[in-house]
Amino acid sequence: MGLGVGVIGCGRWGQNYIRVFHELPAARVIGACDVDPRRLSLISQRYPDVPTFTDLAQLLEQKELDALVVALPVSVQGEVVRTALLRRKHVLAEKPFVVDPREGLELVKLARRVKAALMVGYIFLYNPAVRKLKEHLRDPRQGIGDLYYLYATRTALGPVRNDVNVAWDLAAHDIAIFSYLLETRPESVNAVGSKFLRNSREDVVFATLNYPNQVIGHIHVSWADPNRVRQVVVVGSRQRILYDDLNIQEQLRIFEKSVYSSGKDTDSFGEFILAIRDGDILSPKIEVSEPLKNQCEHFLESIQNGASPLTDGPFALDVLSVLGALQRSLNGNGAAAKVSYEYSLY
């Protein structure tokens, strides 16, 4: 019959979750919940077999409900997640999950106590191109060499959120990607931003993340940019790798180029000669699949086999810790902020 899944929050992401779970044979959409009757009317038109509710309590009372997807503004997600966990429902919450890591830690502990899966929707970690990129970085035979730095650009002209700033909205994705690729956490951050759209929250942010072994991560996010960009670049001593989410034909490109010391003698003290190595540009084959579908399937598998999801509660807590430090640096006009993992469970 499949696991019974309900969705609360039927905006753009909630509608996508309903579509995907409706298509998956291992799941059944038990109900959709939203305070806006117009959204529920749209759901009823598209999916006549999906019951709709304006009250979460009514959805949670459905006997066949096993799991709840929470796709609400982050300011209200925590209480809804808590309510679902107390009813012993498995939960998939949209990123960044909550704002306060203390609340997040309480929810993670609650999920463990009631033996329920708690997963946070960092969708790009379920993208086949990002998975392929990590495989390449982890395999010493692929030849990236020593890792120097990463940088990410995630810009567009809106949409502007009214619950969090652009860092919490967009940079959260890239912090998660960096953590996934590097398998480590930043020690400190610096961030500057501004409110060009006369919003009450930053709509443009530039952030630098300092990782162990002198690896640097840089993130540029904006709601005010005319160009829609979703890119991550990884620079190593022997290769440069570009992940371009919007390039459907070549999401991953590997540049076999590098700069190195030639070893030749120089005329003056302290100088050395650099040589350029210019090689091929490779585009590895990537199996096509929908990241959201992969994420939802992973959620269902985690429930069925009892394993911890890739983007589980502890993973989300670490991203929250970095976002918190980033916010402190923004508030301090770019001053360095140490990342405290006080609420980490790793």
Image (cartoon, rainbow, N blue to C red):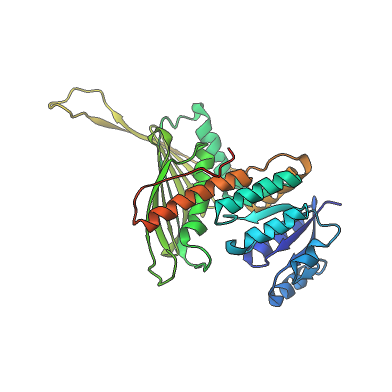
Q: Nearer the viewer, residue 262 or 236?
A: 236
Q: Give the vertical position of 64 relative to 287 (above or below).
A: below
Residue 100 in the image: x percent, y percent?
55, 55
Q: Give the vertical position of 36 relative to 113 (above or below).
A: below
Q: Residue furthest left?
A: 268
| Residue displayed at 53% across by 29% down | 139
Instruction: Describe residue 121's horizontal placement relative to residue 187 as left or right.
Output: right
Q: Give the vertical position of 10 relative to 322 (above or below).
A: below
Residue 289 in the image: x percent, y percent?
65, 49
Instruction: Describe residue 51's horizontal placement relative to residue 263 as left or right.
Output: right
Evaluate whether residue 260 shows in this view: yes
| Residue displayed at 21% across by 28% down | 272
| Residue displayed at 67% across by 65% down | 9
**Quadrant holding the C terminus:** top right
Q: Residue furthest bottom?
A: 38
Residue 257 in the image: x percent, y percent?
37, 36
Q: Quadrant of residue 76?
A: bottom right
The image shows a total of numbered marks equal to 0
Q: Nearer the viewer, residue 111 or 174?
A: 111
| Residue displayed at 85% across by 57% down | 64
Residue 220 in the image: x percent, y percent?
41, 54
